[in-house]
Amino acid sequence: MATIGIFDSGSGGLSVFREIRRIMPHERYIYFSDNANCPYGSKSREFITGRAREITKMLIAKGADLIVIACNTATAAAIATLRKEFGIPFVGMEPAVKPAALGTRSGVIGVLATAGTLKASKYLDTRDRYTKGLEVVEHTGQGFVELVESLELDSPKAYDTVKASLQPLLSAGADTIVLGCTHYPFLLPTMEKVSADLGYEVRFIDPAPAVARQVLKILEEKEIGPAADGRPEVELLSSASADTLQKLFSLSCCSSC
Ligand code: DGL
């Protein structure tokens, strides 16, 4: 059985965790929410790398065989450093620009992500590689992380906040929108409602299932899993109150437990 460490600035990475657990239900999981320092989106690369390093050390001390950086911002800032410094496999978030480029009919792709992700070379390189001849419209999901951390997923405030960031992408003609932050999938029902109310048909792309498949592939290659019949175990840890983490875990990841 493999021990899989997962971390994010907060509870958003649970959107990745639920996909990993869906296809690997018998592993041991340790999820760490760095919510004392959330959001990462506006913080410096140095700060995020420092946090990622400390969290990695802790997860390895707890037995992690593989670490999933379930955060686009932290992946962009720190994955190269972590891979150099630590001798275990890391899986990070890839902005789903390539599937969006292949799927768009209007030729306009929207990308919703944090400011940190949108200015990182990891994202810019991917965008420039796969979107030649297409228009890419980018927007930060202003206030989205805070909504998810306060579990305001479908309130009137959530609706208005989502609308403010989504409308510019829709009115620019985006028919395919990449969710470039792991918190955002928790607002998907609200995003779909806003789009429908404004009269747009749009496809949202969440990279989490692809990330989960990558985790499975690496575990199989390294022959450390997946377990066929292990006793599943989940440890939820956080750097501040674990309230939101517990609640969102029960809402989103716990249908089978
Ligand atoms: N969920 C993270 C991401 O994917 C971090 C959001 C934040 O803390 O700003 O980018």
Image: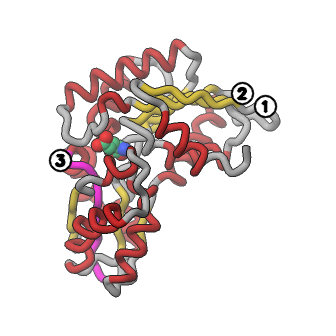
Q: Residue furthest front?
A: 156
Disc 1, SS: loop
Q: Position of residue 246 (x, y in %)?
A: 55, 37
The structure residue drawn at horizontal position 20% and vertical position 31%, both measured from the top left corner, is: 45
Q: Using the image, determine if residue 179 lies above or below residue 159.
A: above
Gap between marks 1 and 2 measured at Cα: 6 Å
Q: Amino acid at mark 3?
A: Lys
Q: Which mark is residue 69?
A: none
Q: Position of residue 253 (x, y in %)?
A: 61, 47
Which quarter of the rendering shows the C terminus? top right
Q: Which residue is mark 2?
A: 1
Which quarter of the rendering shows the N terminus? top right
Lower position in the chain sequence, tag 3 or tag 1: 3
In the image, residue 107 lies in the stretch drawn in magenta: yes
Q: Position of residue 82 (x, y in %)?
A: 36, 24
Discs 1, 2 touching: Cβ within 8 Å: yes
Q: Which SS type dominates the magenta stretch?
A: strand
Please say whether residue 224 is visible from this viewpoint.
Answer: no
Q: Which residue is mark 3?
A: 119
Q: Which residue is mark 1?
A: 230
- Local packing at callout 1 (Cα closer than 10 Å; few below 14, some 14-19, many 20+) is some
